[in-house]
Image (cartoon, rainbow, N blue to C red):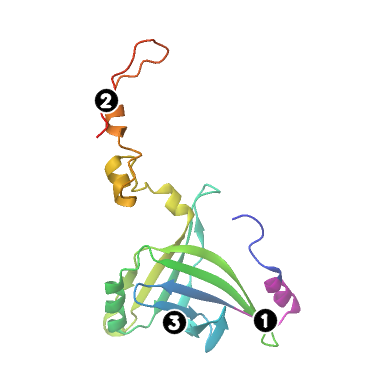
Amino acid sequence: MDGFPISQAVVDIIAQGNFTAIYAVELQFASDTVRAHTGTGQILLGGQVYTGVGQLGEVGGARETDSPAGPASIDVTLSGLDSNILRQTLVERCRGRPGRVMFVVIGRDGEMAADVIMSGRMDAAKFNYGGSDGKNSISVTIIDRMAEWSRPGSKRWTDENHQLRHPGDRIFFAIAQLSESPIFWGSKKDAPSFRYD
């Protein structure tokens, strides 16, 4: 992350003293977007309403790799849930969907400032079934965009793969022929001609 991650607006509220700090989370599931925060009541951030979950919500510490450019991740947990909510989350399949975590400070006069501390994609949800104790919980890991750079891509430099993405564009028509054609660098000997299909 380049630069100082905390904005001047957040620093100004913290400098006043007597402030409340909370985390706000936005998880974009396929059917709906969940917006919650670790305080109580409702707050308005960027024109969106975030519902407080209090002690039932938890944002874990950020984990980074040894490499300074490596991906970071953060766990978001919601506990004390009804089993129906757990079943619905299992159906939603959140892996690869957008998610973000914000650090929010609320001053003594009600002024509020927020900074995004993690933005990326959700990994698969982890479930903890508490049985008769009712301590059910869902934990989702949000992985930043750097993780996508370390994953192998699905694009191939072939005519077939390119046609799926751009029908009618034949820029890679000769790739298969090139891989089997002899190329004589620095020689007057000519390579075989291409077949234009």
Asked whether 19 falls inside the magenta stretch, the response is yes
Amino acid marked by disc 3: Leu
Residue 121 is inside the magenta segment: no
Q: Farthest front residue?
A: 196
Report crowding for label 2: few under 14, some 14 to 19, many 20 or more residues within 10 A (C-alpha). few
138 left or right of 26 in image:
left
Q: Residue at x 32, y 18 (%)?
A: 191
Residue 27 x/y as whole percent? 43, 72
Which residue type does callout 1 highlight?
Phe
Magenta residues, start to end: 9-21
Q: Residue drawn 42% across and 65% down? A: 141
Q: Is residue 167 above or below residue 106?
A: above
Residue that mark 3 sits on: 56
| Magenta region, main secondary structure | helix
Of residue 67 and residue 158, the one placed in the foreground of this image is 158
Q: Nearer the viewer, residue 112 or 165?
A: 165
Q: Quadrant of residue 7?
A: bottom right
Q: Position of residue 160 (x, y in %)?
A: 27, 44
Residue at far top of view: 188
